[in-house]
Amino acid sequence: MRELRIHGRGGQGSVTAAELIAVAAFKSGVQTQAFPAFGVERRGAPVQAFVRFSDEKIRLRSQIYHPNYVIVQDSSLIADIDVFAGLEAGGIALINTEKEVQRAVPEGVKVILVDATKIALEELGLPIVNTTLLGAFAAVSGEITLEALSEALSERFADSLAEKNIKAATIAYNMLKGEV
Amino acid sequence: MLQVLEGSIAVAEAVKVCKVDVISAYPITPQTHIVEKLAEMVAEGEIDSEYICVESEFSALSACLGASAAGSRVYSATSSQGLILMAEVCFNVAGMRQPVVMTIANRAMGAPLSIWNDQQDSLTLRDSGWIQVYAEDVQEVTDLHIIAYKVCEDHRVLLPAFVCFDGFVLSHTYEPVEIPDQGLVDKYLPAYNPYNMLDAKQPLSMGMYATPDYYHEFRYEHEMAMQRAAGVWREAGAEFAKIFSRDYSQAVEGYRLEDADIALVALGSVCGTIKDAIDEMRNDGLKVGLLKIRVYRPFPADDIKKALSGMKKVAVVEKNLSSGSRMLGIVGLEVKDAINDSSISVLSYVTGLGGRDIRKSDIRKIVNACNEGKGNMFSGLREEIL
């Protein structure tokens, strides 16, 4: 079983991102389970959401302590929260940022930086980065295919909005494909 | 077709295919997403149901009682304080033998205020005369609603039911689930056929005074219906399994119990975590199994006795507290009574209250304590803050 933790701020669509990853993963042929950190939804406050991936039916209901992947939607969280907590060697941290990360990274963890805000602003006209980061996640994790993600986005959003989000995700995907 | 849905949305979809006539509910975390989705379905004309907005849970269930008495298939959902505010009406719905189905998104009771999961709310209403069933995953809670209507509306039963699933842990989790096909559900669950109903042309009264000459017998008849519900559940579950290929006909379900020395007993979503923990402990040579209780009322004492015969020790994982009782847990007392065999040790472990996460390591600690003969205790306490 592989596990993902998403860090974001309330309103940034962390739970939506987790849901979309779960939908896309299921379409990619794996069993999934996605859930938010329970009961902490407040706009602007640090929030977390989680996804599990497995080849077998997922029965485990406890929270996630040792993720294989971390997505950080807002790099300003890094100063206050140990976004690398529980990540072990071989783990991947995908961080939305335009600058270097000022925090010690656990040994063996691969940190991948992507300026998702820039892509989102150009493609969506809004700094809503979750769908862009999903494209990046597809590229660096291999847990979901870009096709499955695009399908999930098409189901979730209306026509033109879906197209824009798919484009933003595809740009990030192409940018990071081959990084890991 | 399997699709990834949030637990609450899957429940709303289950209610939709049950074609309920009247919905009345008052929003409370973590039940909210269910009733928001149903309100949206009504507003969009996706379902032909009346949604009655009210100012409290007391009124919500009162509206359901009236609508049910008038011959409608009705639905409500609640959690925690909301359920306890309904307590008076719960007894009335059951006493008037109305087949109301209500989802309980299980949540801790205040004070202190907690929006998080345990099972204190529905277990506290154990004796209110409702059937109670507990789901392990999103598929199960979806399916149990359909079976619940079938059983409750059966003229041999005519009782209401709580369909319980763990708040947040299941209500806010997205996972693959199949929403049963409308056409097949229509065949399985035909339109509600009331045994009797309020009708101006043939007036009758419900919930009248019962003097001491009658009350005792009313309660007896109620109890007989509850006892019959066990068999009707098996039948309805078997029929569901034939059509939908998912079998919930058994009130209890064993996991790796056959050759076990220690049996864990639990209700709800923690059963999934326990199964994973059991697989790990089995790899370490510990002969552990699980008995999951799906139907809690009527209490399946005979099934439990049969399933647990041959065990050396039984550890009941309790997400509740029966304050002041020797065993501390509500379920353990009844399991012990069901086994009625002094050679099998039955101990309760109160854990996971107010949303405290239950990990595989917590289950292992319970098994270790049980092995050492320690039990009827809180497990997973943070000693450093006491």
Image: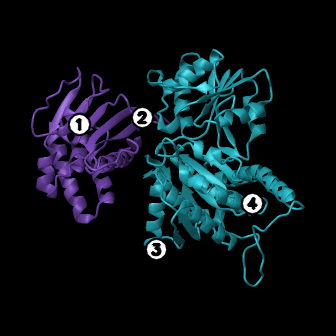
Disc 2 element: loop
* Above or below for B272 versus B62: above
Q: Quadrant of the C terminus of chain A?
A: top left
Task: Using a 10 Å C-alpha cutoff, classify the residue at mark 2 as few (fewer than 14 neighbours), some (14 to 19) or many (20 or more).
Answer: some
Q: Looking at the image, which residue is at 60% across and 63% down?
A: B61
Mark 1 residue element: helix
Q: Which residue is mark 1?
A: A140
Give, as a three-letter code, the residue at label 3: Gly
Q: Which residue is mark 2?
A: A63
Identified by mark 4, the residue type is: Gly
Closer to the observer: label 1 or label 3?
3
What is the CA distance from the residue labelled 1 to the residue labelled 2?
23 Å
Foreground mark, 4 or 2?
4
**Residue B325 placement (x, y as % from top left):** 68, 32
Q: CA distance from mark 1 to mark 3?
A: 43 Å
Which color was chain A given? Answer: purple
Secondary element at image label 4: helix
Which element carries disc 3, helix, strand or loop? loop
Marks 4 and 1, how far apart in space?
A: 60 Å
Q: Are marks 4 and 1 in contact (CB under 8 Å)?
A: no
Chain where mark 3 sits:
B
Seen in the image, is A68 located left or right of residue B44?
Answer: left
Which chain letter goes with mark 4? B
Using the rendered image, report if marks 2 and 3 lie on a common chain: no
Residue B143, given in percent of the width and then of the height, sits at 58, 53
Q: Is residue B163 above or below residue B350?
A: below
Residue tagged by mark 3?
B45
Disc 4 designates what residue? B95
Camera-side residue of B43 and B46 = B43
